[in-house]
Amino acid sequence: MFFWKQKSRDTTQPKGSDSLSPSLAANLQKLQGEIFANDETIVYRRFKTKKPRALDCALVYADNMVKHEYLSLSVLRPMMQAEVPGSVRGRQLAHYFAEQVIYSDDSQFVASYSDIGDRIMEGVAVILVDGCSLGIVVDAKGWAKRAVTEPPTESVVRGPRQGFSEDLGVNISMVRLKIASPHFKTRFLSVGTQSKTRVAIMYLENVTSMALVEEVQRRIEQIKIDAVLDSGYIQELIQDAPFSPFPTIGQTERPDVVAAKILEGRVAVLVDGSPFALTMPYLLVEAFQANEDYYNHWIIASFHRLVRYISFFITTSTPALYIALISYHPQLIPTNLVVSIAAARKNTPFPGIVEVVGMGLVFEILREGGVRLPRPIGQAISIVGAIVLGDAAVSASLISAPMIIVVGITGVAGFVVPTLNDISVLMRLFFVLLAAVLGLYGFVLGAIAIGLLLSSMESFGVPYLSTMTTLVPQDVKDTLLRVPWWQMVLRPRFIAAKDRQRLTRSDGSKAT
Amino acid sequence: MRRRGLRILIVLLLCLLLSGCWDYIEIEALEFVFGLGVDQVEPEYVVVLEMVKTSGGGQQPQVEAKVLATRGQSVSSAASALSNPAGLRAFWPHAYVFLISEQVAKDGILPAVEHIIRSRHVRSTIWVFVTKECTAEEVFKSKPPVANSVSEHLNAIVLMQESIAGFIPLQIWELNKAFTAEGIAPVLPTVKLVHEQGDLMPIVEGTAVFKGDRMVGWLDGQESDLLCLLKGINQRAYYVIHTKVGEEGFYPITYELVGNQIKIEPVAKGGKISISISLTMQFGIEEVGAAPISFRDEQMVHSVEDQLATAFTRRLRDFLQKTHREYNVDVIGLGQLIKRKQPQVWRSLRENWQDHLKDLQVDLDVQCRVVVSGVAAEPIAVRD
């Protein structure tokens, strides 16, 4: 593929004893005895070119990582049928084969054993010719890949049905197809001393701040770890506020989301083997934005967005408010309600705080069980949860009925803002404990503490709450509401560094 | 540095936790007081509480009202003695109504209401009533037709006041204000018991008139409606007035008051003060029965309007006669009005305001208009 050409061309200058020997037998012995010793997946296919000059050759590759048919037809067949002129000698042989014999859209040369080792692990095939101290690299990568499907974590009613797969090249091409601009740039890095995972940094040159790109690259380059199996490793290793549960790096499985973030001036990081792309900087407001907001009618999208904010409040605060009201401030509950809550709580054995924490825990256990188990068993879990724990617990006077309602609405509302779902569980517990000790006063103290934490956070130099704490019209256009596209003239102030103009109105006027 | 941060955190956490959960209560351990009544003040307080008993739990929670009465040295001591045997804590903020028995009202209500005004647990928006010809305990033990408790029943009536008429509801903070204000007498709505299919049912009708904190007389439902008119309160009251229709004779016609505006002006003339009241009322025709009245006939409508004005002028005169001369109390707050509009005049009147009230001249100007006749302008013509 297209991204390691440069690197391998530089390595055609061998150094010391690592460089290939002209003798095929010596080369094979070195590979078999040293580099790939005890590795039985490496295939060494010996063959000869056509007489009269029958040169000894070998095709070396890792089994099951190459396209076998392609190698046989486009590499082995022409080489076996080639009549090599007697004048071609030494390193010229490699060039002769690459230029005139092999049918391959991508062929390069290697001159050292360590390079051969690295490249064969990537899934290419290397041809060694007797008498030539250069190996020919043929890109014949081919292994089982998952098809491009709709991501299960971010399904949409309206919008593209594409999701990233585990293949970095495919993933990059999906984003590239959405931003067909020469300003769209991709940089490659390799992370992990053992895994040598390829990491791609993507950005839009004419919008994104170069300082941001350099910073992202610097942070990734500083990572010294043996292996990176998912983008989560990188996310955790380079984020700004490691002790805060709030995410400062976004993640998504959708190319359209990545494209949108890049177009606003963010940097995206793709990791080979992970379908989750990272985007940065990441602001709190992004947790409440869904890609569907931008595809649907703006009034409907704005309504849904308001529902998300309300749901986040409900999921984090309802149990705490319930505890505070019934344990400290029953006078604030409407009379009919307070009497029916009191009646429902009669004869239940546990105090309110125990009910709230206990039922919250039960809900989380059910949820975790549902996520980890295979889908058919997951359904059984939900039945057990709904009937046994909900209905039976109330009938047996173990739990009061209002508590079930509180836990239910809390749990369901939590799924509305999936990005913050895990955090809202922690916030809920935090608020509940404060409310149980100090009532509404404690709840308000907790809310202030969370507010302080959020406003002290930054993501790659951008304040975490920016656009939520301003009244500048163009900055708030995409926060509480999603204003119509013709109003979103500028890119976000804190993200886009260079060209802020996103849209030009039909009369040519440039809004501010 | 890090150690120090940790220490500060621990100290803060301890402050939070060791202070304990002050004020922590379990909601099911509360006994919600819905109503409070005082039946007797001398020699000992007799206090009645209507509480809500919750029971059940699980899937059949039940709520029922219960009434407890006891004696004590004061309202608060008696009330707290009542919640003791129940083993539960009386919870006051949800109390709806406060009943004062007729006897207490006659002897002076200040000892009974003082605790309610002072208490931080009882809301200042609690409704205050005087029980007429019965005690608070009897009222609480009567049987409201729909509501679970008498207090909820009375509260529901009060919230419907605009369309029920016949009384003026009052909250405890307004009573407190009326006590301390100059030139206006406190009035409280009255609760009485009526027989309804063998059961006693509490209704709110009429007004108790106070001089200071002692009750001096009653106003019935119709007089209360007149008081509403004079106080400028809007009420959808119904009036059945025998009206002369053409030359045919008198028919009872039901009018609904749909709007009323009042303007009261004190007029000082030659050292003597008089009051000029101009009242405008708009009526709708609710029911004419068999009266052959056509509302397309302008003359006929004018005649009806004139008759209404005359009838109301007469009723208001009687009302003022009764309150100013007989009870000698300023229920409308004319004194307050004079104080506001002509403070110099008030200074000379305030000492003997009640004497002045007896022969205070009030000029009435009543204008009535019939504005709605329902969906029928003509009488229903019945033919063979």
Image (cartoon, coloured by chain):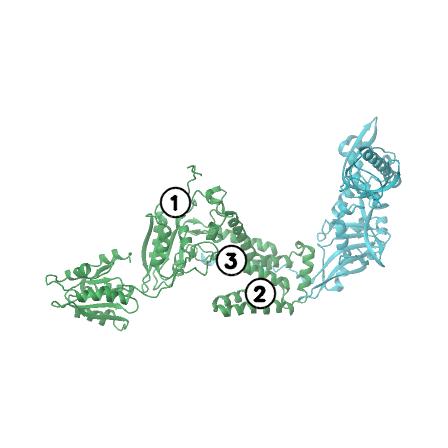
Chain colours: A green, B cyan
- Residue placed under numbered mark 3 in the picture: B9
Location of residue B240 with respect to B16 vertically, above or below: above
- Residues under labels 2 and 1: Cα distance? 48 Å
Point out the image quarter for the N terminus of chain B: bottom left
Q: Percent from the top left, x then y, of residue B124?
A: 72, 49
> What crowding class fits label 3: few (fewer than 14 Cα within 10 Å), some (14-19), or many (20 or more)?
few
- Residues under labels 3 and 1: Cα distance? 40 Å
SS category of the residue bearing label 3 = helix
Q: Chain of mark 3?
A: B
Q: Count all numbered tags in the image, as a single digit.
A: 3
> What crowding class fits label 2: few (fewer than 14 Cα within 10 Å), some (14-19), or many (20 or more)?
many
- Residue placed under numbered mark 1 in the picture: A497
Q: Chain of mark 1?
A: A
- Amino acid type indicated by mark 2: Met
Q: Percent from the top left, x then y, of residue A402?
A: 63, 61
Location of residue B359 with respect to B97 vertically, above or below: above
- Residues under labels 3 and 2: Cα distance? 29 Å
Q: Is residue B162 left or right of residue A144?
A: right
> What crowding class fits label 1: few (fewer than 14 Cα within 10 Å), some (14-19), or many (20 or more)?
some
The quarter of the displayed image where residue A389 is located: bottom right
Q: Chain of mark 2?
A: A
Nearer the viewer's eye, disc 3 or disc 2? 2
Q: Percent from the top left, x then y, of residue B65?
A: 76, 60
Q: Do the residues at pointers 3 and 1 share their chain?
A: no
Location of residue B209 with respect to A7 vertically, above or below: above
For the point 36% across and 59% down, the residue is A271
- Amino acid type indicated by mark 1: Ala
Q: Specify the farthest residue to the top.
A: B270
Query: Which badge, 2 or 1, is on the more N-terminal residue?
Result: 2
- Residue placed under numbered mark 2 in the picture: A359
The answer, for residue B63, to whether it is visible in the render is: yes
The answer, for residue A433, to whether it is visible in the render is: no
